[in-house]
Image (cartoon, coloured by chain):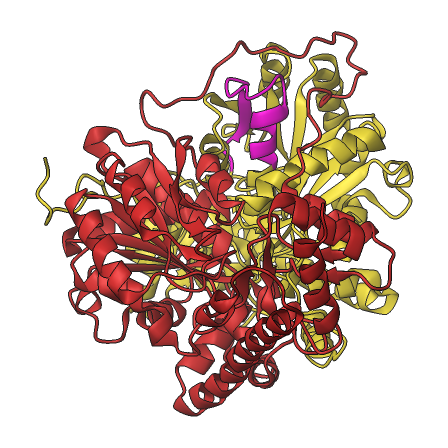
Amino acid sequence: MSRPGSSPDEKGVSQNGDPGGQCPLFTNTLNAPVSPETRLLSAFARDTQARKVDLAGREYYSEEGKPFELRLVGKIKQQLSTDPTLHPEYPSSLGLREFTRKATEVALGKHSRAIVENQVLGVQTPGFTAAVRLGAELLRCWYDLSADWCGPVYLSSPCDDSLAGIFQAAGIQEIREYYYWDDKQRGICLERLLEDLESAPEHSVVVLSASAHYPTGADLSQSQWAVITRLITSRRLFPFLLLPTQALCCGDMERDAWPVQHCASLGMELLCAQSFSHCFGLYGEAVGHLLCVLKQNSVLLPVQSQADKIVRSLWARPSVGGAHVVTTVLSNSAHLVEWQGEVKHIVERCMLIRAILREKLRLLGTPGRWDHLTQQGGLFCCIGLNGEQVEFLSNRRRVYLLPGGCLNVSAINCRNLDYIAESIHLALTSSL
Amino acid sequence: MAPFSMSLFSDVPQAPPVAVFKLTADFREDTHPQKVNLGVGAYRTDDCQPWVLPVVKKVERLIVEDESLNHEYLPILGLPEFRSAASKVALGDDSPAIKENRVGGVQALGGTGALRIGAEFLRRWYNGVNNAATPVYVSAPTWENHNGVFADAGFKDIRPYHYWDAAQRGLDLTGFLDDLEKAPEYSIFVLHACAHNPTGTDPTQEEWKQIAEVMKRRKLYVFFDSAYQGFASGSLEKDAWAIRFFVSEGFELFIAQSFSKNFGLYNERVGNLTVVSKDNENLTRVLSQMEKIVRTTWSNPPSQGARIVSKTLNSPELFEEWKGNVKTMADRVLLMRDQLKAKLQALGTPGTWDHITQQIGMFSFTGLTPKQVEYMIKEKHVYLMASGRINMCGLTSKNIDYVAQSIHEAVTKVQ
């Protein structure tokens, strides 16, 4: 499905040079270039040193060093497996209705005006990437039709390295960056961020992290959001919010979703990609959701029907297992309390690790500023090392970070903390 | 300039509803006590209920109780033991291609997901680079989503190939072979591995041989859609004969496999794209690009369904039990076919009804005209597709007399 005038390059029909018929068909297929993240992961995998430390993983790691299933989730899975009312039927392409209702509520708040006025579309997706992809497809096919819109989309610098590819796969080629993380300040440079967005063409899409920014961990404050939403409104930009680890930043679903609620309360149209993988420990279950808040309820059904059509040729329908678990928890107040308790434990551990790491670096006399470690929340954090220093860590100390010098705080535990702090110290003090 | 209060989606038109879902929606609203739904393609027991395969129930329990389970994201290409087991079940235990290490798999969200990943790959890397003009041929008729998947993957030229001969109520082999001869070289053909949807009519082994000969000579690309292995005849081997024959003829090909029907895992979205390459080096390059495509589609596939299928296929006992469950489903369909034909013959319904037992799989192309179908729905509350396609699984011992009677009336009263 593409708009007139936006078709890709077209060449003649028969392109395969070889007439022999015996030659393999995909000789032109290049070996896919390896993304920096993948390169690190394979380096880590090939590293046979016992002492290697992987701080680049995506999941929340327990003190034992493994992703785990929440106790409550295990219990509910047991219950659901014996539930006679659950039938193996095809779910609707938009997903389980109870799930989308709950997912919408946790993002917007139960009494959101947008929900009450029926201006909200919720689509269950097989995970977070799928939610972003669906949003990207919706934008490319149906956003601002009269202007034949095809970009640009603005992504934070840095951001998840797969984001650009997702929008491009949906057919939006023009991807730009806006300034976000400032190494010197060890935080967001709002001034330069605003500069970049001020110069964005009207109707540009801006991808913003609602909480627990990946990979830096640096989030906008409420007052910064107020400034940004004013700019978005005056420049007529379209916000696409990301909420991949809701509740793991502040320990509170609502607080983590505040930016989404704020934008909606201002009457903005927006998309929001959500994931329940992290906050439920359901990584393998691909439980995602795309929220779409519209300005008029008259466009809800048309947009829904088009979202349905896009889904049908991508994955047809989402998988239900994980969504059942999430719905069960969110619909039951006793479960909710138990779940919040487990999440609190995760959040507190992350905060503790941040505090301890900061203290270790202070005690070692490591040069640089480390306050941001405890000012941020969530799983990820940018240490502020340059490329050389990151390589030093992987080559000489077998400590693997994400390319920009960011790391997953939960992968630090009592067994590797000293070694990691020492390594960071060495990276910053050895002459490289 | 649009005012701030106006939605930037105001010009979005309503997409037309999908026929088969609309049919089910209408069926649900119908209050007639004898209504029958012969529309949607899912298995039903004789009590018209969905069926959780006993082996699936058993394996689900094992998984839930497994303390050693890994709770990480699955790799992008999916659960390794699922991918290899899925490809093995399609190509056979002793497949030379597997032994030669030139077979790989990409776990996908159901058969649709597998088709889409394969289509996206072909549009980027087949017949040149990013050649969206390569013709893609789908059978006339075919599963309606085939068109959407290839179009949305970027292909500009999707054409029908002759398949169903309405007059003869069988395969139009001449037309099919003719289209193969006339297709531009390197065109892509989507073939149904068995239990053709919607006609239930498959080529015979001899006919497959003829098809393969032309395809090899004309350098046409083979993309199998395999959603019913085991479900069609009750035998995994028989249902995979065409696939295995093509592989033995040296074709490089894709197979989009679905485990929705033969495992009853409709809601867990278990599919696999099997890739058969010329050699391991090619396979590696192809899979590296597949990974890139998956990374921007769903990134990491869901694990539950893949675990169930993998555990089952990789355990000799569970595998046998599964084959038994599949045969149960296939046998019930075969029984309904026999009985429907017998009842129509007993009623003296005009026309021949041999095609009902000659066709195979979930669906039957009855040959009812659109007007007769309308009569069935409006007057008799028996819901079927306008094409005359019925889902045999919708028939039960309790409703088969009513359905046979309704068909009889439709054929005798309506022209």
Figure check: B393 above or below B318: above
Colour of chain B as rendered: yellow
The quadrant of the picture occupied by the N terminus of chain A is: top left
What residue range appears in magenta?
B118-142
Relative to A429, say whether B113 is above or below: above
| Image coordinates for residue A361, horizontal then vertical, percent | 62, 69
- Which residue is most to the bottom? A334
Where's residue A196, x and y in %? 31, 40
In the image, B203 versus A416, the foreground residue is: A416
Q: Residue at x 33, y 34 (%)?
A: A151
Task: Quadrant for the C terminus of chain A, please.
Answer: top right
Tell me the shade of chain A. Answer: red
Nearer to the camera, A314 or B25: A314
Residue B287 part of the magenta segment: no
Position of residue B116 relative to residue A343, above or below, is: above
Query: Where residue B249 sits: x, y (%)?
Result: 83, 26
Left/right placement of residue B360 relative to residue A275 reads right
Q: Quadrant of residue B274?
A: top right
Image location (x, y in percent) of residue A254: 33, 75
Question: What's the residue at 65%, 55% (across, down)?
Answer: A428
Q: Is residue B137 magenta?
A: yes
